Image (cartoon, rainbow, N blue to C red):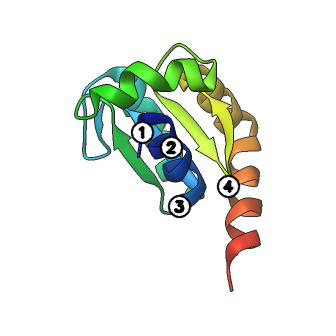
Amino acid sequence: MDVIQKIERQIKDNIILIYMKGTPSAPSCGFSAQAVQALSVCGEKFAYVDILEHTDIRRELPKYANWPTFPQLWIDGELIGGCSIIMEMLQNGELQKLIAKTTNKYKK
């Protein structure tokens, strides 16, 4: 499996996925820390990929996503954006609504 296939599989297999520096319990940059806090407020589980541990993904994802920076939040296969967008969506209530709508869609 090449790197792009790996990225596509991760995005497909995880309803809420954040590509970040570090882990949710130990973020390695302030932007990743803010993004994780915003997701935590929403109260749903999310997957993550530590791009510092996966240099191949760190190198290829910006080209694949056409988004140059990290973190990157993907919900239901769609790129939502980075830290600024995540924080703006949290503040205006859009993030909570999107996550609730998406997780409800997949609940059995």
Q: Earlier in the sequence, mark 3 or mark 2?
A: 2
Q: Name the quadrant containing residue 15.
A: bottom right
Q: In x, y percent, where is residue 58?
A: 37, 24
Instruction: Judge depth for marks 4 and 3 and give the one in front.
Output: 4
Residue tagged 4: 99
Looking at the picture, which amino acid does disc 3 mark?
Gly
Q: Is residue 58 left or right of residue 61?
A: left
**Residue 108, label in figure:** none
Quarter of the image with the C terminus is bottom right
Looking at the picture, which amino acid does disc 2 mark?
Gln
Q: Is residue 49 left or right of residue 13?
A: left
Instruction: Judge depth for marks 3 and 1 and give the one in front.
Output: 1
Q: In x, y percent, where is residue 47?
A: 44, 54
Residue tagged 1: 2
Q: Earlier in the sequence, mark 2 or mark 4?
A: 2
Measured Cα–Cα span from mark 2 to mark 4? 25 Å
Looking at the picture, which amino acid does disc 1 mark?
Asp
